[in-house]
Amino acid sequence: MKQQLLIPLYRLYERRLLDQLDTTALPRHIGIILDGHRRYARAERMPDYTTAYRAGMAKFESVMEWAKELNIDVTGWVLSTENLKRPAEEIEPYFDVLIELFNRLPILAQRHGFRLQFIGSVDMLPSRLVEAAKKAADVCTAGDRTVTIAMGYGGRQEIVDACRDLVDSLVEDGVDPPELSQHIDKDGISAHLYTADLPDPDLVIRTSGESRLSGFLLWQSAYAEYAFVDVYWPAFRRVDFLRALRDFTRRERRFGQ
């Protein structure tokens, strides 16, 4: 009952936040660390984590809609390389929930006008998860915006992979081994990152009250702004999203200068 009474107030607050947004200063690309599923399940006394996982993926779907309204690209980190070390009874249900999401993405992409891509170390993931992701990506190829899902992703591994790919391409181009180091620069590495076709994120949001990146988009987020939100991911609200955007538009970005 209390929650129902709060809904009209949240709607009013959302409208106020929208009115306060400087639409000329919005981020083009937001990275989101979807953190806090298990803690949310424990806090809400849920019998298992699966319900929290489903609530979290439903929230990610909502964020796709919110981003559409403001013409923003989104990269969501749904699964890290460290997550893969969790016990099977925790991680296997999460794989199932991710596959459920991927099966819905073609409809969502058509509705919200985005193309879909996945980034991460595919070789570390179970085949059923990879197959569902590939099937969704093959269908969701058109749209004015991009939704990127980071899965089996680690920022250090991405940089290692980019350096390896750069060296391989230089060798293929006929560069002599003694001269390779002279051709390795930041532009070359950037061109071989998983997100080479996207602008760097302007804003990174992390939920659950943790104030760290944990390796998310390490290279790309060098000059990003950050918003650390206290709520667990499944409880993330549109007002939290809009407040992060409002605060971003009020900051003076200096890009290290």
Image: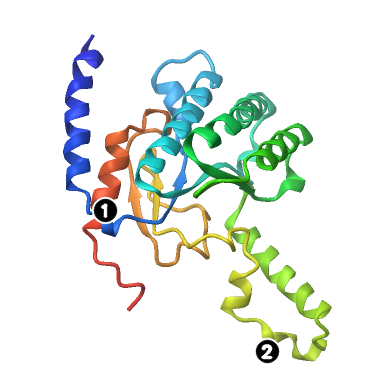
- Quadrant housing residue 24: bottom left
SS of the residue under disc 1 = helix
- Please state which amino acid type lies under the numbered disc 1: Thr
- As rendered, which of 215 and 243 lies closer to the eye? 243
Labels 1 and 2 touching (C-beta < 8 A) = no
State whether residue 121 is above or below residue 221.
above
Crowd tier of the residue under label 1, counting other residues whose Cα lies within 10 Å: few below 14, some 14–19, many 20 or above: few
> Can I make out residue 115 in this image?
yes
Residue 39, horizontal then vertical, whole percent: 44, 29
Which residue shows up at 47% across the image and 62% down it? 200
Which residue shows up at 73% across the image and 47% down it? 122
Residue 239, horizontal then vertical, whole percent: 27, 36
Crowd tier of the residue under label 2, counting other residues whose Cα lies within 10 Å: few below 14, some 14–19, many 20 or above: few
State whether residue 165 is above or below residue 238.
below
SS of the residue under disc 2 = helix
- As rendered, which of 110 and 158 lies closer to the eye? 110
- Quadrant where the C terminus sits is bottom left
